[in-house]
Amino acid sequence: MDSIRQNKVSRLIQKELSEIFQREGITLFNGNLISVTMVRMSPDLALAKVYLSIFTPNGRENAFPLVDENKKVIRHSLAQKIKNQVKLIPELAFFIDDSIDYMNRIEELLKK
């Protein structure tokens, strides 16, 4: 179970990363729409597991490597926004959130 501090920091990081992805989406990610669905913090607040939904006409395979390439830029932008609220800027680990695909697959199975 997550602590209150972990929940607060994860919500803060999710909010700020969402703004960064929205603002920098055109330049860093070739205009792909990327949304932050969930952030999970490690107990020591040193690692943030960031789950992303990627909506792109080119497919996730092309967009996700762009996120990984720009990890340092994203972390730096995040640090500029939250440096006064946290002691340590966490490392970011990005993952694709496949819950929408899972939901669509269940709907298809139920329709049969």
Image: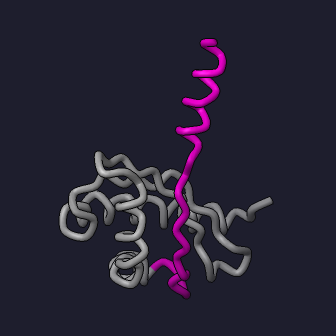
Which residue is situated farthest in the top direction here? Answer: 112
- Residue 51 placement (x, y as % from top left): 54, 58
Residue drawn 37% across and 76% down? 74
Asked if 112 appears above or below 35 in the picture, the reply is: above
31 left or right of 43 in image: left
Front position in the image: 24 or 80 = 24
Q: Which residues are magenta?
A: 85-112
Asked if 20 appears above or below 76 in the picture, the reply is: above
- Residue 91 placement (x, y as % from top left): 54, 82
- Residue 53 placement (x, y as % from top left): 45, 50
Question: Which quadrant would the C terminus be assigned to in this image?
Answer: top right
Residue drawn 57% across and 68% down? 9
Query: In the figure, residue 61 lies in which quadrant?
Result: bottom left
> Does residue 83 show up magenta in the picture?
no
Query: In the figure, residue 41 lies in which quadrant?
Result: bottom right
Front position in the image: 60 or 88 = 60
Front position in the image: 88 or 51 = 51
17 left or right of 4 in image: left
Residue drawn 50% across and 51% down? 37
- Residue 44 placement (x, y as % from top left): 70, 81
3 left or right of 31 in image: right
Question: Which quadrant would the N terminus be assigned to in this image?
Answer: bottom right
> Does residue 94 show up magenta in the picture?
yes
